[in-house]
Image (cartoon, rainbow, N blue to C red):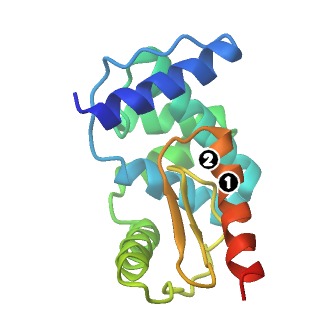
Amino acid sequence: MTLKTDEVRNVLSTYGKQVRIESDFHGTVANTLDAHRLIQHYQGELGPEVAENIVDSLYDQYFTQQAHPSAPETLLKAATAAGIDKTKAEAFVADKYEGLHVPKLLLREQVSNEIASASGKAPIRWSHEHRRRPAIVPYVLVDGKRRDLTLEGAKEVDEYLKTPETVLKQFRRT
């Protein structure tokens, strides 16, 4: 494991223990594109509450039950836990291409923003009807006056609070 991975696990374990969740990080690490596809599809179709319920189930299954993050049975369980009709959920999960363009578009946007942030350019804003989405992996990009600030991955609350303070200092100096 890398130091960054250990840090993330420690932070997640600490937060989990505060709400009586015992995390188990021995599950399969795998591509989560299908999980994101499921979340984005039902957020667009049924709203953010349903998407949040899907995310809660996926997190519970992955972090406490060692479920494969994008196995069809994991996705189906998450969908039905969120109140989605089992037959509809089975059809969606089985069709690997339905709704795939949305998470791919969002992934391209995130990569483009990372490149833009590193090069000092303005972030790219892709237009798409599914723009409202739950934060699956924390990724915060703040447009600063002199430079953009990017927070990626699990962070302590204090780190998130420092970011607007830094931006305010940039604007006060001019």
Checking the image for residue 52, the label placed there is none
For mark 1, give the secondary structure. helix
Q: Please give left or right for residue 60 compared with residue 167 in the image.
A: left
The percent coordinates of residue 153 (x first, y second) are 47, 47
Residue 134 at x, y percent in the picture = 63, 55
Say what amino acid the circle numbered 2 marks.
Answer: Glu
Check if mark 1's residue and mark 2's residue have beta carbons within 8 Å: yes
**In front of the other: 115 or 38:** 115
Of 169 and 80, nearer the camera is: 169
Residue occupying image coordinates x 43% and y 70%: 110
What is the x, y in percent for residue 105?
42, 76
| Crowd band around label 1 with a 10 angstrom C-alpha radius: few (<14), some (14–19), many (20+) | few
Quote the CA–CA distance across marks 1 and 2.
5 Å
Residue appearing at x 29%, y 32% in the figure: 3
Quadrant the C terminus occupies? bottom right
Q: Amino acid at mark 1?
A: Lys
Q: Is residue 6 visible?
A: yes
User: What residue did someone put label 1 on?
Assistant: 162
For the residue pair 172 and 94, the one nearer the viewer reads as: 172
Name which quarter of the figure residue 19 lies in. top right
Against 134, is 70 above or below?
above
Residue 85 in sight here: no
Badge 2 element: helix
Q: What x and y, as percent, mark residue 132?
A: 67, 68
List the residue tagged with mark 2.
159
- Looking at the image, which residue is at 36% across and 57% down? 95
Rendered residue at 69%/16% (across/down): 18
- In the rendered image of this protein, does residue 92 appear above or below residue 87? below
